[in-house]
Image (spheres, rainbow, N blue to C red):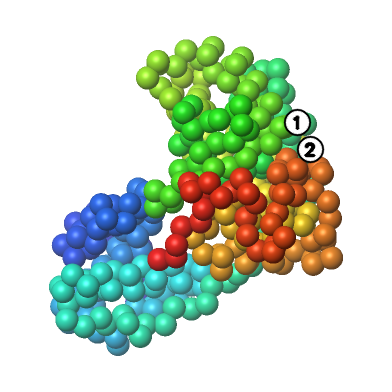
Amino acid sequence: MGQIRPSDRSSHERLHPWVERFVEYLRAERGYSEHTVAAYVHDLRLLQAYVTHHGDAWERLGYAELVGFAGWLAEQGYRLSSMSRILSAVRSFFRFLTEVRVLAENPAALLAVPLRDRRLPEVLSEEDVDRLLQVIPSRSPVGCRDRAIVSLLYATGLRVSELVRLRLDDLDLAEGRLLCRGKGGRVRWLPIGRAARADLEAYLTAVRPRWRPSTRESAVFLNRRGRPLSRVAVWQRLRHWARLAGLPMTVYPHRVRHTFATHLLQRGADLRTVQVLLGHASIGTTEVYTHVHPQRFRAALDRHPLGSWLRRKSPAGDRPPQSAEDPACKPPSED
């Protein structure tokens, strides 16, 4: 059987009504971002293409057909992480159909999801971060903006989608913190740190006003035309500076996020604190960072942008710092 991809003719076909109803549920009731909804649509288009190719009827899909779909994914060379994501989307889809009584029984209830490969991508060293920041010329407008972006990514662990969604009202520079609007409408307060705050203030004072944004434009990071910076643009600028710095790996925003978490653990932060800062709903997601050598957990926090803040941990060691106990900063309950 040839490969079936959502980029083929199936990607232009209308979604099955059941899938459309599920997508509306994700948007309206779950509050998922368009990026997350698009990922679900991508995965369910694969299932739709598979069902269409085999001439199956959605109403008659059973456990055996879904196992066949999982086997086809493996035959097509999908990685375990991709298979896990796709089959999790399928399980969520059929669970929804059962809950709203479109189906009497859930054919995916016993569908096994392969364990994901928990390997963490290679991270930057502290020396790599220093080289990256030093190569960005803060005297040029674009360089000043880009330095603020890199400093903020490393100091806070923001996702790139969270970075480009930042609004001026989300910044509380007097207190050295920002309000992050994360996945699923969850929000959390994050400390910025002195170095990142200085870079951010330099950009906001000397560069952003020069690009003459509309008075109604509240995005923190803009391009030279005064429009909000895109996720792709952030990725491209980061890659550009990493090449100039001669770093031996491809650098992208999520790698900086991994670096942020890894360096915190290396310098003694507890896993619960890192979970809160990253905005993970489950600490199981954060546990991937425990690959850090345990002998480095006790190092001091002095050189990290969050150092003094993280030292104010509770005696129990399993709760976030006091400043993270703001209701907006508490981790959400697990789904």
The kind of secondary structure element at disc 2 is: helix
In the image, residue 26 sits, relative to residue 195, either above or below, namely below
Q: Is residue 267 above or below residue 318?
A: above
Q: Position of residue 153 (x, y in %)?
A: 62, 41
The correct choice, above or below, for 263 with respect to 65 in the image is above
* Residue 177 in sight: yes
In which quadrant will I find the C terminus? bottom left
Answer whether residue 160 is visible to the viewer in this image. no
As measured in the structure, the alpha-carbon distance from the residue carrying label 2 to the one carrying label 1 is 6 Å
- The amino acid pointed to by label 1 is Val
Quarter of the image with the N terminus in it = bottom left
For disc 2, the marked residue is 131
Q: In this view, does 224 lie to the left or right of 286?
A: left
- Number of labels in the image equals 2
Q: Which quadrant would residue 16 be assigned to in this image?
A: bottom left
> Foreground: 201 or 87?
201
Q: Position of residue 256 (x, y in %)?
A: 65, 47
Alpha-carbon neighbours of circle 2 within 10 Å: few (<14), some, or many (≥20)? some
Residue that label 1 marks:
135
Q: Is residue 105 left or right of residue 79?
A: left
> Residue at left 65%, top 20%?
202
Q: Residue furthest front?
A: 315
Residue plotted at (50% across, 24% down): 223
Residue 176 falls in image quadrant: top right
Q: Residue at x 63, y 60 (%)?
A: 319
Give residue 274's position: percent from left, percent from top: 63, 56
Picture layout, residue 56 above or below residue 146: below
Q: Which residue is drawn at 82% across and 59% down?
A: 298
> Is the residue under label 1 in contact with that under label 2 (CB below 8 Å)?
yes
Q: What residue type is labelled 2?
A: Arg
How many C-alpha atoms fall within 10 Å of the one at disc 1: few (<14), some, or many (≥20)?
Answer: some
Q: State the SS at label 1.
A: helix
